[in-house]
Amino acid sequence: MEKAREFLVRLFNSLGLETRLIPSAVHPAVFAQTPHQTELPTILIYGHYDVQPPGAPSQWVSPPWEPTVRKDRIYARGSSDNKGQLLIHILSAQELINKFGLHKLPLNIKFYIEGEEEIGSPGIKKVFSDNLDLLSADYLIISDTEMLAPNQPAIDISLRGVMDLEIEIQTASHDVHSGQFGGLAPNPAFILSQLLSGMKNGHDKITLPGFYQDVKGLSANEREDFYRLEPSPDDLLKEGHLYYLSAAEPGITLNQRRWSEPTLDITGLESGYTGQGSKTIIPHDASAKISIRLVPNQNPEKIYQQIVTYFQKNTPKRCCLRIILYPSVPPYKAPTSHPIYSLAKQILKNVFGNPTVFTGQGGSIGSVPVITQFFNIPCLLIGFGLPDDNVHAPNEHLSLENFSKGISAMTLLYAQIPTLTR
């Protein structure tokens, strides 16, 4: 982390940018900006220098911390998520500086590169609250996602939010003998399993009262775009190495299910003895970790209260119930009527040779709803990764063709942003 920060500071300084570290919850962010000109529009480019651990070195063909080029791809941890995609924007800024000069740029450029994205951006709200003037901008630009396929540019217009909880039910102070107390002692594993199962129906629909009340549906155009990009079930089975797809309500497409529908999943279960062999006990407690993906207009605090109410109402009265809420991320929906989206679609089409499509992301980027709400600005999410980049996995890589075309596209976009009406 320290070496990554030092590299960014040296790189930004070499371009003549004003550069500083901004303290955050765990790791400081790197901030850099061109000389500010009041009359010009300002873009804020977000990225992150932290990455996932590489895992076992034996699973990598080449060392994860030594960038290696093979077959027009660069392999290294962080090559796609997010260092390679971030570098596209830094080199685009360099192109503009070389063309116009540092003090004659057609717009103001700011970079906010955080070191906490992979742990949920715990410090970003306070950082922006404490540095509103420094970080203010007219547009937020991020490349931390992917294209649908080679030479198929895409702009992500929605992100699902996420909230994670841990539920624990305790029925005794310790485990008891299953022969001596079998038929007498309540089993917390069964109690918790039944409560978890009661949160969904047979069509994978979440049954918490009021859960879907605030869900904002897709527009007719968005629904049509998502349908045109519909994958085959076999493609998804192959991509996820799945044996089959879960059930769903009739009429809901695959893209709707993965991009615009809320979800509730059990991510971990623990109770009793789980070692080798058997052990004749009735456990005294059971716990589950659950993860909920939220869609636009859903409020994490409101959903949390619905879950608390459900478990308090349905858990046997003499059980000890504990519910732990972890930091959550709200969902995001792009204002696609803003002219920056039309401009970006046209430029990407010209560079990559195919029409640009609007897509959604099933995952979350914690910075997006925070920054856009602080400044009431649009976020342009343009990914230059590909679905097979092995993000967060061994042998992560980035297409050098996408890297090169990405620099060309973003350089053109930044040069033309001043033509937009603010």
Image: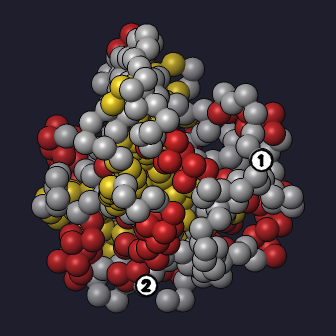
Q: Secondary structure at mark 1?
A: loop
Q: Is residue 277 above or below residue 337?
A: above
Res. 102 in view: no
Task: Name the N-terminal-most of marks 1 and 2.
Answer: 1
Residue furthest toward the right?
Answer: 251
Question: As drawn, is 403 to the left or to the right of 325?
Answer: right
Image coords of residue 87 (percent x, y): 38, 47
The amino acid marked with disc number 1 is Ala
Which three-letter amino acid code belongs to the residue tagged 2? Asn
| For the residues bearing labels 1 and 2, Cβ distance under 8 angstroms | no
Disc ID at residue 247? 1
* Secondary element at tag 2: loop
Q: Quadrant of residue 155?
A: bottom right
Q: Position of residue 300 (x, y in %)?
A: 45, 71
Q: Which mark is residue 376?
A: 2
- Residue at 73 percent across and 73 percent down: it is 218
Query: Which x, y percent locates residue 345?
Result: 67, 65
Residue that appears at 23% across and 63% down: 123
